[in-house]
Amino acid sequence: MRPTGMSAVLLLLLAAACPLPGARADASLWTAYVNCTYTKNNYTRSDVGELGMFGQDSPRKRVQGVVAVAEGEDYTACAAGTNFSAPAEGAWIALIQRGSCTFREKIDNAASRGAVGVVVYNTDPGNRVTTMSHPGTENTVAIMIGNEKGRDILGLIKQGIQVTMVIEVAKKHGAWMNHYSIFFVSVSFFIVTAATVGYFIFYSARRLRLTRAQNRKLKKLQADAKRAIGQLQLRTLKQGDTEVGPDGDSCAVCIDNYKPNDVVRILTCNHFFHKACIDPWLLEHRTCPMCKCDILKALGIAVDVEEAPADTGSDMASNATPPATVSPTTISSAPSWPEEDARSETASSGYASVRGMDEISGKDERASGQNSGGDNEQLVKHEPNVLEVDVLPHMDNPSFEDEESQRRELKS
């Protein structure tokens, strides 16, 4: 199986943490104190600092001697048999420029001439040093110093000034990242990656579960809406109907005037619209575009979860509006919702229902003003035959009035 990118990175980190066969067990770095002493203008000066770094194969011990450089203009000491400006007697340390050959060749050439130590100065600008690798020269102390310090010592020697150098072991520095550090980083990386992937899986599963629940709910609502739409009444407009006359209204969905042979669907609130216009709307919203009447609740297909429980109906009835008295003739003249003829005759479009309510309210006010006196006399004369009913608050949807049972009590 091919590893993924994350697994490949983890394997590389683990591989880096394991030492390769034949690798050196001691990856530590040792610095060196360099003390240079010279006399100039009858003034002896000594410069001391942690300026050098021991080579990997160099013995770590203290050495001292007079500093000598290769004779000629080439200070790399790469040629076999290179002569140095060393004193005839006493210990001396070779100062060699980096480059042109390996560190081992430089150290071997200086050791063959009797040097007790070798100082290689870097060619890079500044005082940067690197770790030297020179296997086979374990008997000669070898360190590297920076370019600036090496060129300063070389300049003094060219002026004929004798420079004495003392090399001492300074401090041990561990590798920038040892095996334990790599292992710790690898384990931390694995833990963080596992936690991130786990959270992502949990978050994705939760989102998927919520999405599926919403889809199931939406499909159920659409199925209920299709069933409710099938129960709504259809009507075909004919020539001579008031809806297609000069004063006819237009569909509130498409804003087109009604024409003969148009098929309209009548909602439970008696608003009607073009069948082709209102059916997609009902599938999506399940409410009347004008009065927001929910067809599922009106037809009893869906029950609102926020409705009060059924056992509280008696309390609601006790707190309802006090019953009003009306004459028997008024009750008998009221239209009945279940009758299809009455529904078709009282159906109206959105705009017509609003305009019709204003006209009806004006007529009711005028009629109540003219018949107030006669009605009072009639109620007094026929008080034994008065019929008491509960009048519900006015609603645009007559289906709500049918769902509530009217209490009628005939006084004998």
Image: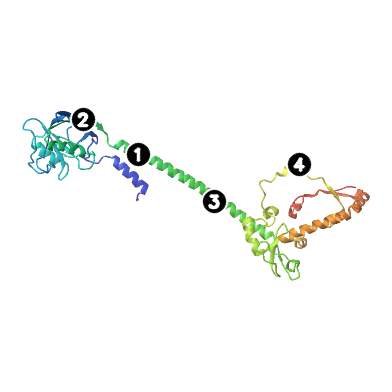
Cβ atoms under marks 3 and 4 closer than 8 Å: no
Give the residue type at disc 3.
Arg
Mark toward the start of the polypeptide (4 vs 2): 2
Give the residue type at disc 2.
Val
Cβ atoms under marks 1 and 3 closer than 8 Å: no
Q: Disc 3 versus disc 4: distance between alpha carbons?
A: 40 Å
Q: Which residue is mark 4?
A: 315
- Label 1 crowd (10 A; few <14 / some 14-19 / many >=20): some
Cβ atoms under marks 4 and 1 closer than 8 Å: no
- Nearer the observer, 45 or 76: 45
Q: Disc 4 versus disc 2: distance between alpha carbons?
A: 102 Å
Tag nearer the camera, 4 or 2: 2
Q: Tag on residue 48?
A: 2
Q: Is residue 249 above or below residue 180?
A: below
Please give left or right for residue 408 compared with residue 37 in the image. Answer: right
Mark toward the start of the polypeptide (2 vs 1): 2
| Residue 117 quadrant | top left
| Residue 35 pos. (x, y %) | 18, 30
Q: Tag on residue 185?
A: 1
Q: Is residue 97 above or below residue 350?
A: above
